[in-house]
Image (cartoon, rainbow, N blue to C red):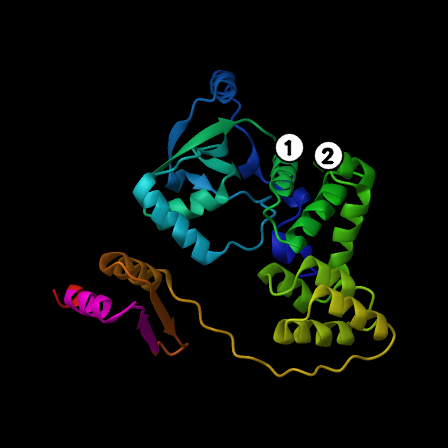
Amino acid sequence: MTKEKGVLGRGLASILSSSNTNLIKNPNQEKEIESSAITGITHEILICQIVPNPFQPRIKFDQEKLNELAISIEQLGIIQPITVRKMEEGEFQLISGERRFKAAKIAGLDKIPAYIRIANDKEMLEMALVENIQRENLNPIEVALSYQRLIKEIQLTQEQCSIRVGKNRSTISNFLRLLKLPEIIQKALIDGTISNGHARSLLSITSKESQINLCQDIIANGYSVREVEQLSKEFSTRIYKRTSKNKSIPTPLPFLQQKMAHDLSKNINTPIELKRNKKGRGKLIITFNDDEDLIRIIEKISN
């Protein structure tokens, strides 16, 4: 996690040196694209022609939410177009809308509506970073890495960065400090098993081992931020020993099984819970309200 290239992809310098990122140089085509971008005209673009944004600051995409969005797209279509830039050889590169793009592929769409813009690589990076930060839908580590990239690769000071994104300099500094935490704690922040407040409290502990031990106890015991603040003060220079034991992590359901459960729940008009282990063994829980509801469900399944 602390190795940024492994998380966010190649550095800007290597991307800039690639011929694949050059814009089309046809003046008429650029004029047409600029005109459509200004007037808000959308184009239907083949999904197979679109490549991901190499500057995308988001590390984690919630698979369950992507699947839910895919089901919504199947029923209602794409409500908000994505934004792309034109590349060479009929290829387009995402600027924004990667969740919609991924969900559209899951839904099996061939085309997707898009706004086409012209931008160079540095502008692409800054647009992707600033837009995502301003949407406030990134986890704290993604935000911290976004600030780090704005400062390093766009060559901004923390003060200039704060002006770009409309945040206080102290806010940016606090996010950047999170990157000093051990990788396992950063992952817990990404997964949402601890909060930003928990992580900031852990920063006051000197020992990395103690930070990790307390982080594991936060997850296992559900410590509040206030409790962690007190423990962090007490063990700022002392070794904190873990008190909890490892807990098994539930196996996420494949999309096909999620959809099957969703479709069955919709068909019999009652909540359904599907659980499975790593070997594929599991159980299907069907909820009913009373005897009459149970008879209704059984008749519905039997038909």
Q: Amino acid at mark 2?
A: Arg
Residue found 52% across the figure and 19% down from its top: 38
Residue found 31% across the figure and 72% down from its top: 284
Q: Is residue 134 left or right of residue 71?
A: right
Please tell me the numbered disc located at residue 123: 1
Report whether residue 219 is seen.
Answer: yes
Residue stretch rendered in magenta on the structure? 282-299
Q: Is residue 293 magenta?
A: yes
Which of the image's four quarters has the N terminus?
bottom right
Q: Is residue 146 above or below residue 187?
A: above
Q: Quadrant of residue 64?
A: bottom left
Which of the image's four quarters has the C terminus?
bottom left
Q: Which residue was labeled with disc 2?
A: 164
The image position of residue 138, as x and y in percent, is 61, 49
Q: Is residue 212 magenta?
A: no
Residue found 37% across the figure and 48% down from its top: 70
Return the residue nearer the eye: 45 or 142: 142
Report, in whole angstroms, how far the alpha carbon at label 1 lies from the one at label 2: 13 Å
Label 1: which secondary element: helix
Q: Is residue 256 left or right of residue 239?
A: left
Report whether residue 87 is seen.
Answer: no
Q: Residues within 10 Å of mark 1 (few under 14, many from 20)?
A: few
Q: Is residue 210 above or below residue 166?
A: below
The image position of residue 187, as x and y in percent, is 63, 64
